[in-house]
């Protein structure tokens, strides 16, 4: 698979924006008596993160949030791919699921979070919201990939009576994997943003979202930036690991 060079982070560009951040923090601190409360510097955020790392409470929050948010992602990947496979061969099912995918894709995540709080407890909220937000890109992309399958290959498989398992492995999977990979890359970032927002609103105990909310109400901007950096690091790590697994599978099916 071709790598997306445009999305790679360059050290010089990261350093540039860190300097802009540092400069903005220094300007605010000089201009206002409590300017440091408005924008903590990257150095302050990094030092605060180093203070948090040895704490068991830190790793408990990271573990709880990761389990629920990434669990929601995996659940939605499985469900979206399965429904896409079924809908690819069924026009009525495609028509039935089209409004659902369109509504979920267009509705603000905050609306779903508030509605879901009526039905679910706060501990299940981030898993549900993550799964919900991941569903449209996975379902729609995999569906499109399967519908682009060369009909001549399918006719050939039917003529030679190739078993369904070999057809899935040799025809459908290589066709759908590039579309699934693209959807997963988008959805992994989306699920972390939606899941963290759900935790900030639902406030389940011992989660990253709860820590973000407490940092906000107590005006601890170094904590706010430190926990935001944790979310970015987790999203990048999970994306790298998951896409590496998808690429390994793609190599086995010969894509």
Image (spheres, rainbow, N blue to C red):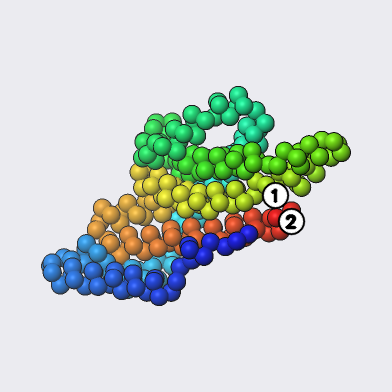
Residue 176, placed above or below residue 245: above
In x, y percent, where is residue 132? 49, 39
Task: Residue at the far right: name it.
Answer: 160
Residue at 30%, 57% (x, y): give it.
Answer: 215
Left-right relation of 172 to 8? right
Query: Which quadrant would the C terminus be assigned to in this image?
Result: bottom right
Left-right relation of 115 to 68? left
Residue 143, placed above or below residue 253: above
Residue at the disc numbered 1: 174
Left-right relation of 232 to 78? left
Q: Dot 2 lies on which element?
A: loop
Residue at 64%, 34% (x, y): give it.
Answer: 88
In x, y percent, where is residue 81? 62, 40
Q: Quadrant of residue 90?
A: top right
Q: How many numbered marks have been drawn onto this rendered protein structure?
A: 2
Viewer-side residue, 134 vs 114: 134
Residue at 25%, 73% (x, y): give it.
Answer: 23
Residue at 43%, 60% (x, y): give it.
Answer: 232
User: Which of the numbered marks, if any, corresponds to residue 254?
Assistant: 2
Viewer-side residue, 238 vs 124: 238
Task: Residue at the far front: name it.
Answer: 152
Q: How much space separates mark 1 and mark 2, taking CA atoms? A: 7 Å
First in sequence: mark 1 vs mark 2: 1
Crowding near the residue tagged with mark 1, few <14, some 14–19, many ≥20 C-alpha atoms within 10 Å: many
Can see residue 199? Answer: no
Crowding near the residue tagged with mark 2, few <14, some 14–19, many ≥20 C-alpha atoms within 10 Å: few
In x, y percent, where is residue 249? 69, 55
Residue 19, placed above or below residue 196: below
Is the Cβ of the residue at disc 1 closer than 8 Å to that at disc 2? Answer: yes
Can see residue 73? Answer: yes
Query: Which quadrant would the N terminus be assigned to in this image?
Result: bottom right
């Amino acid at each position: 698979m071709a790598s997306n060079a445009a999305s790679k982070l360059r050290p010089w560009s990261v350093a540039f924006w860190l300097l802009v951040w540092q400069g903005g923090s220094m300007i605010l601190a000089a201009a206002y008596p409590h300017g440091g409360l408005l924008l903590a510097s990257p150095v302050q955020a990094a030092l605060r993160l180093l203070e948090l790392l040895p704490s068991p409470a830190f790793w408990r929050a990271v573990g709880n949030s990761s389990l629920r948010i990434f669990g929601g992602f995996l659940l939605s990947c499985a469900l979206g791919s399965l429904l896409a496979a079924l809908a690819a061969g069924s026009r009525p099912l495609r028509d039935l699921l089209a409004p659902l995918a369109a509504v979920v894709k267009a509705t603000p995540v905050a609306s779903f979070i508030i509605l879901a709080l009526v039905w679910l407890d706060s501990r299940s909220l981030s898993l549900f919201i993550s799964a919900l937000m991941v569903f449209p890109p996975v379902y729609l992309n995999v569906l499109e990939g399967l519908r682009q399958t060369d009909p001549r290959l399918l006719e050939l498989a039917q003529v030679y009576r190739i078993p369904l398992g070999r057809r899935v492995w040799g025809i459908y999977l290589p066709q759908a994997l590039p579309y699934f990979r693209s959807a997963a890359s988008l959805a992994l970032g989306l699920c972390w943003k939606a899941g963290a927002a759900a935790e900030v609103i639902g406030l389940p105990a011992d989660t990253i979202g709860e820590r973000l909310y407490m940092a906000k109400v107590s005006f601890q901007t170094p904590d706010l930036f430190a926990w935001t950096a944790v979310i970015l690091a987790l999203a990048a790590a999970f994306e790298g690991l998951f896409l590496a697994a998808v690429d390994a599978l793609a190599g086995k099916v010969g894509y």
